[in-house]
Image (cartoon, helix red, strand yellow):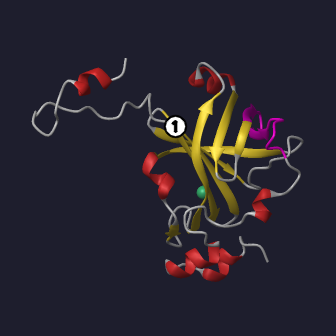
Amino acid sequence: MSLTEYRRKRDFKVTPEPKGARRSAARKLTFVVQKHQASHLHYDFRLEWNGVLLSWAIPKGPSLDPSVKRLAMQVEDHPLEYGGFEGVIPEGEYGGGTVMVWDRGTWDPEVPDVDAALGKGELKFTLFGKKLKGSWVLVRTPRGWLLIKHRDEFVTKADIVTEQPRSVISKKLLRDIARIHHGNVEKAAKGDPA
Ligand code: MN
């Protein structure tokens, strides 16, 4: 059921009745990949689920080559608002360094029950990002999770993290973000292409 009929019958400029928030089920689930130059460069891959961002740290970043399995260490859930964060975490703080919104968009589960799939350790999903598109899987192994591209029209041998190093929201490199936000430019630049 949607609220279309409820809303059609009412003029919310006149009645004090609630219009109703956008139904979470109707809103697309979001995902974000944040490139993070902390003590080591990594890519934080985050999927919106149950009101939080499930999060994995991927040292080498995602690959569009299905033969490449990228280690993805699950880390603590993050708040949804974190997905918009681009800037500098002060040195000495947890994760101190520069953060870029490297990709973002929406995602669809390819399974009927996401919680069951996560529990089983195999989540198939489709990404609708600027850089990452198509079908993927996260598989849990004794060493950690693996992020793997499925075969589809978006597969390529090209190294997307090298070829598309810029922020999707500001078009900036890590060193630019560090400079603007008064971070460590030299350290941030280590995560940029030479
Ligand atoms: Mn991180």
Q: Position of residue 29 (x, y in %)?
A: 52, 37
Residue occupying image coordinates x 56% and y 74%: 177
- Residue 127, given in percent of the width and then of the height, sits at 65, 40
State the residue in front, 105 or 91. 105
Residue 185 falls left or right of residue 136: left
**What quarter of the picture does the N terminus occupy?**
top left
Residue kind at label 1, given as amino acid type: Leu
Image coordinates of residue 85 in percent, x first then y, are: 49, 60
- Under circle 1, the secondary element is strand
Q: Quadrant of residue 97?
A: bottom right
Q: Is residue 91 left or right of residue 173?
A: left
- Classified by dominant secondary structure, the portion drawn in magenta counts as strand
Query: Ligand 1 appears in which quadrant?
Result: bottom right
Q: Residues within 10 Å of mark 1 (few under 14, many from 20)?
A: some
On the image, numbered disc 1 is attached to which residue?
29
Residue 89, percent across and down? 51, 68
Residue toward you, 19 or 121? 19
Which residue is more in the foreground, 153 or 163?
153
**Which residues are drawn in magenta?**
136-155
> Is residue 153 among the parts visible in the rendering?
yes
Q: Quadrant of the C terminus?
A: bottom right
Numbered label tally: 1
Give the residue displayed 44% in from the left and 28% down from the top.
25
* Residue 109: quadrant of the picture: top right
Q: Tell whether position 147 is magenta.
A: yes
